């Protein structure tokens, strides 16, 4: 190998929200080493095991590299031309016969870690024109987004923990030392938490399991799964009854606070304590600490969102941070100022994106442009006008990720036509008629549009692709635009990809010019377009978004500002744009221009909180479990991340095991209202009595998948136990925590992988 073929590349890791900087060494088309980029101003050399093995996704022999068409149970490689013709034939047949709503879409989590996905999937969805939009959001963070939409005016106006300056960090339903942070982009969470403690602060964790994060905390209290709202209401009850509220910077910008205080007066802290399992004096102690500590944060994440009070939890957390004076305050929770595509930049409020239409069968309201994933199977199964007969998936695996996965699996097999954009032939894409392979992460450029809007510092980092695309591989943005052209009625000429790309850029320009305060408002749009013409695809859009963002050069109007050229050439390790800063009241885009403390649907939902809660005395309560080496369902085909001891186990307290006559390491049967699995049990004192825990994303044992390593460590699909009929009634979010299950000895002698 000649020395000139050896290169070093710097880029951000696209696998999770932490956005760690990587230093990637290559020889020709092979990666020889990956290490943390010590010059990255944000991650400073830190990376987790997933980032260290990013190249294994590129070199995975099971990765799909050519378009595939399924004939019965047989797959064959084909050309891009034939693949898109088949997609057009299959989807247009359904659209012409049954209308556009008969074709649904499902977007998986990797789309928000992908520049092309963020910029071009919306174009595809508009071209498709179907109301049946589904995504991983409605089994994840949608309660947070809906709360932000109602309280602050935009679903991306989510206050972010200013963890680097806080003195008190109260954590519920989150395991940031394993997840690397969620809705809180912050590499090296362990160091950041240790720094809180070094400066005399403390971290308190509320969790039914003694997680890695709980073990690092100063205090850990167990809670009955699904009852976080009762604990949070107890905190607020104490703050209000003891006169501890002090709104700080938010004082003059709130609506409805008195209505909320009055509603919470009706609660008994003793009843709240009894329901959540945390003693009254502990609730009161923590409430006083949050209220009296200078610079405090209450933070809740996945565990608080994926339960029956998901939106209630998200709302109460916001309220606590506000009434203790910690909103928009250094060391509290603050709003980011993203360099590109900022969705919390202010402006005029439009109507709430909620309930503008409803699902056909359950009449569940639309939330932020999509319907709950829990409704997908019934919409496919149920005949009649509006039935879903076609499906488009992009980087998603709902068979393993969504509730009642077995039902979704059966529903997908009944579709008339399905197309998937994915790197793998997995549990979901095996049902597709056409599989379109997206490039590996190392074959595309990268910029974290989403997660720099959720970051604990204002950061901008553009990464060039490490490897050139093979000549016969389309870039992902080209695939998405070809799909858009395939489902459109309009004729787009000989080059539909260029036509759609040019149109999308011109729409961005016109949108910016509608802002009368923009330096570009009086410029010729054709001239602006011309200044971008040397680029195509995501880079052209990103350049425009950077140049018109808060730190942009506005095409020469601000000579010291950012552009893609400046960011790429001058800051190859990324640019730190500074700590979070005060943004009230400019960030607010509610109709009133104030923070809506008492949204009507959430106030109404308080009555549900007052009702008697089923104790589920005869059942154990199942909660999910996060794992550092996993990324939902799609990194189990990497040997280095799945070797070692079996991680797909049911963890159970020894006292519960004794009551059920269950021995450690034995195979047990776990049954819920909708499904049953067999899995190996692991007895641990870390798990609260009455609770069992099982990781999600496993179950790689189905026929027709092409995941050799994943099949060797198949595990079991925990979502065969989650009930798609049970949702957070406000947001429609799926419930993965607090699921009643029965656990019994498995009489069979057969072995299982999990």
Image (spheres, grey):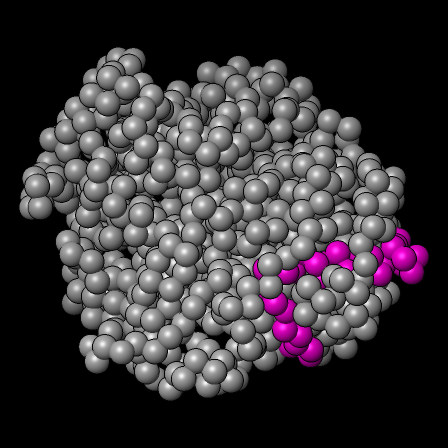
Report whether 618 appears left or right of 264.
Answer: left
Q: Residue at x 45, y 21 (%)?
A: 506
| Residue 641 can be seen in this image | no
* Residue 556 within the magenta-colored segment of the rendering: no
Report whether 748 appears left or right of 177.
Answer: left
Return the residue nearer the eye: 666 or 321.
666
Report whether 492 appears left or right of 327.
Answer: left
Q: How many marks?
A: 0
Return the residue nearer the eye: 218 or 358.
358
Return the residue nearer the eye: 716 or 586.
716
Locate residue 287, reporting x and y percent: 80, 64
Locate residue 99, reporting x and y percent: 31, 18
Locate residue 313, reporting x and y percent: 65, 52
Q: Residue at x 41, y 56 (%)?
A: 673
Residue 530 occupies quadrant: top left
Q: Residue at x 84, y 40 (%)?
A: 259
* Residue 232 within the magenta-colored segment of the rendering: yes
Segment tinted magenta in the rendering: 217-246
Where does the C terminus fall, quadrant-wise? Answer: bottom left
| Depicted 366 relative to depicted 385: above or below | below
| Depicted 376 relative to depicted 680: above or below | above
Locate residue 434, reporting x and y percent: 17, 38
Q: In the image as oriented, which residue stretches furthest toward the front?
A: 618
| Residue 359 can be seen in this image | yes
Report whether 181 appears left or right of 32.
Answer: right
Residue 437 occupies quadrant: top left
């Amino acid at each position: 190998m000649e020395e000139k073929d050896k290169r070093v590349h710097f880029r951000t890791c696209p696998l999770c929200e932490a956005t760690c900087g990587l230093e990637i060494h290559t020889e020709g088309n092979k990666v020889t080493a990956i290490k943390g980029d010590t010059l990255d101003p944000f991650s400073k050399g830190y990376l987790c095991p997933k980032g260290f093995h990013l190249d294994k996704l590129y070199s995975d022999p099971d990765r799909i590299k050519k378009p595939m068409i399924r004939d019965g149970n047989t797959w064959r490689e084909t050309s891009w031309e034939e693949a898109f013709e088949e997609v057009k034939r299959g989807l247009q047949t359904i659209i012409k016969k049954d209308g556009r709503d008969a074709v649904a879409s499902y977007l998986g989590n990797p789309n928000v870690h992908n520049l092309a996905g963020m910029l071009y999937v919306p174009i595809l969805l508009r071209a498709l024109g179907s109301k049946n939009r589904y995504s991983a959001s409605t089994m994840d963070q949608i309660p947070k987004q809906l709360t932000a939409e109602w309280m602050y005016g935009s679903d991306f106006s989510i206050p972010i923990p200013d963890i680097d300056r806080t003195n008190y960090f109260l954590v519920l339903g989150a395991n940031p030392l394993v997840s690397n942070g969620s809705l809180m982009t912050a590499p090296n969470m362990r160091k950041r938490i240790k720094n809180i403690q070094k400066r005399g602060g403390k971290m308190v964790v509320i969790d039914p399991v003694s997680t890695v994060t709980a073990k690092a905390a100063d205090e850990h209290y167990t809670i009955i799964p699904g009852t976080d709202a009762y604990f949070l209401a107890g905190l607020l009850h104490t703050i209000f009854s003891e006169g501890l509220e002090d709104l700080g910077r938010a004082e003059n910008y709130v609506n409805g606070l008195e209505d909320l205080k009055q509603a919470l007066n009706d609660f008994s802290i003793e009843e709240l304590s009894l329901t959540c399992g945390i003693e009254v004096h502990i609730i009161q102690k923590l409430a006083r600490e949050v209220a009296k500590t200078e610079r405090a944060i209450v933070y809740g994440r996945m565990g608080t969102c994926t339960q029956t009070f998901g939106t209630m939890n998200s709302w109460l957390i916001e309220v606590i941070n506000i009434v203790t004076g910690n909103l928009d305050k250094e060391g509290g929770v603050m709003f980011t100022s993203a360099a590109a595509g900022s969705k919390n930049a202010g402006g005029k409020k439009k109507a709430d994106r909620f309930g503008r239409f409803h699902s056909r069968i359950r009449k569940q309201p639309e939330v932020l442009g999509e319907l709950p994933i829990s409704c997908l199977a019934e919409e496919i199964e149920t005949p009649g006008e509006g039935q879903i007969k076609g499906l488009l998936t992009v980087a998603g695996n709902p068979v393993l990720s969504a509730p009642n996965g077995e039902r979704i699996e059966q529903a997908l097999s009944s579709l008339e036509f399905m197309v998937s954009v994915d790197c793998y032939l997995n549990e979901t894409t095996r049902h597709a008629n056409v599989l379109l392979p997206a490039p590996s992460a190392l074959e595309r450029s990268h910029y974290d549009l989403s997660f720099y809007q959720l970051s604990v510092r204002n950061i901008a980092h553009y990464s060039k692709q490490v490897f050139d695309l093979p000549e016969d591989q389309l870039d992902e943005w080209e695939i998405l635009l070809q799909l858009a052209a395939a489902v459109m009625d309009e004729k787009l000429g000989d080059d539909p990809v260029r036509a759609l790309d040019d149109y999308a850029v011109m729409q961005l320009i016109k949108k910016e010019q509608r802002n009368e305060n923009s330096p570009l408002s009086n410029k010729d749009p054709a001239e602006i377009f011309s200044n971008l013409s040397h680029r195509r695809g995501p880079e052209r859009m990103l350049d425009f978004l950077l140049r018109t963002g808060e730190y942009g050069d506005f095409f020469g109007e601000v000579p010291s500002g950012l552009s893609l050229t400046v960011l790429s050439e001058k800051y190859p390790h990324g640019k730190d744009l500074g700590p979070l800063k005060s943004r009230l009241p400019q960030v607010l885009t509610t109709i009133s221009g104030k923070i809506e403390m008492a949204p009507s649907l959430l106030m109404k939902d308080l009555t549900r909180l007052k009702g008697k809660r089923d104790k589920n005395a005869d059942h154990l309560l199942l909660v999910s479990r996060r794992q550092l080496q996993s990324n939902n369902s799609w990194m189990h085909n990497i040997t280095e991340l799945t070797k070692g001891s079996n991680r797909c186990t049911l963890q159970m307290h020894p006292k519960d095991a004794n009551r059920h006559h269950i021995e450690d390491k034995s195979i047990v049967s776990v049954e819920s209202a909708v499904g049953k699995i067999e899995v190996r049990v692991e007895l641990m004192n870390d798990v609260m009595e009455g609770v069992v825990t099982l990781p999600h994303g496993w179950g790689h044992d189905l026929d027709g998948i092409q995941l050799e390593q994943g099949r060797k460590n198949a595990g079991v699909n925990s979502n065969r136990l989650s009930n798609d009929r049970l949702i957070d009634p406000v947001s429609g979010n799926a419930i993965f925590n607090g699921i009643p299950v029965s656990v019994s000895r498995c009489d069979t002698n057969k072995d299982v992988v999990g």
